[in-house]
Image: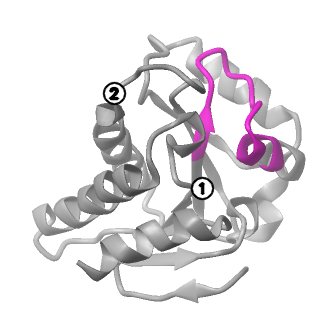
């Protein structure tokens, strides 16, 4: 699974998302439902092409705006413990989009995890492949998780695992967690 920094609420892992074994995983997909980024491709190889078809079908029922989240079964990843895949419409590479979509997208991921009653969700550093600075993504994503946990006032809440095989991204998230 890779090296991990463990904590009760948030974990950091240097392992790959598709190998996390968490009940739900979340990654970025483009607005057409194509799984073209490196993480998306790895998820599709592990889960099977059916996952892309399912994501496209679910996305066709939405406005496909940045931060839209749709959930599908995990198909070929089910045998690894992954039951659900959250597909997040994320920033296209080299576009001037504001990183503000990350906050509501992370909230939607957590809402889906709560709705499906999964004990843990693993995700990548959403938006960083599209040009959002590592530090910015770390601040927004980690802070949303912490704030939503506080809002729940001790109620059930999924553990969040950020799968960050890139050392620079991992360090940005580790710095944010130490604050």
Q: Is residue 21 visible?
A: yes
Q: Which mark is residue 4?
A: none
Q: CA distance from mark 1 to mark 2?
A: 24 Å
**In percent of the image, x 58 and y 85: which residue is there?**
4
Residue at label 2?
A: 98
| Disc number lying in front (1 or 2) | 2
Residue at label 1?
A: 25
Question: Residue 39, percent across and down?
Answer: 72, 48
Q: Quadrant of residue 97?
A: top left
Q: Is residue 163 visible?
A: no
Residue 9 vertical position relative to residue 90 in the rendered view, above or below = below
Of the image marks 1 and 2, the number of the one nearer the N terminus: 1
Left of 166 or right of it: where is 131? left
Look at the image and give the residue range highlighted in magenta.
27-42
Residue 40 lies in the magenta-colored region? yes
Left of 40 or right of it: where is 171? left
Question: Residue 174, percent across and down?
Answer: 42, 76
**In percent of the image, x 32 and y 62: which residue is there?**
142
Residue 171 vertical position relative to residue 111 in the rendered view, above or below = below
Question: Residue 46, percent across and down?
Answer: 86, 53
Q: Secondary structure at mark 1?
A: strand
Question: Residue 60, percent across and down?
Answer: 59, 12
**In percent of the image, x 88 and y 34: which residue is there?**
49
Quadrant of the frame with the C terminus: bottom left
Q: How many marks?
A: 2
């Amino acid at each position: 699974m890779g090296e991990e920094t463990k904590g009760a609420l948030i974990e950091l892992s240097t392992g790959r998302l598709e190998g996390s074994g968490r009940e739900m995983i979340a990654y970025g997909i483009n607005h057409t439902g194509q799984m073209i980024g490196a993480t998306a491709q790895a998820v599709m190889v592990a889960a099977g092409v059916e996952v892309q078809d399912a994501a496209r079908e679910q996305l066709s029922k939405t406005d496909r705006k940045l931060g839209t989240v749709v959930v599908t079964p995990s198909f070929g990843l089910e045998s690894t413990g992954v039951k659900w895949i959250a597909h997040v419409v994320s920033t296209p590479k080299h576009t001037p989009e504001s990183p503000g979509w990350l906050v509501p997208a992370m909230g939607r991921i957590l809402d889906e995890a709560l709705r499906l009653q999964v004990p843990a969700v693993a995700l990548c550093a959403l938006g960083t492949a599209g040009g959002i600075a590592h530090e910015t993504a770390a601040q927004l994503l980690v802070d949303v998780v912490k704030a939503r946990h506080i809002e729940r006032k001790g109620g059930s809440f999924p553990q969040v695992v950020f799968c960050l095989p890139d050392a620079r991204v991992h360090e940005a998230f580790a710095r944010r967690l130490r604050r």
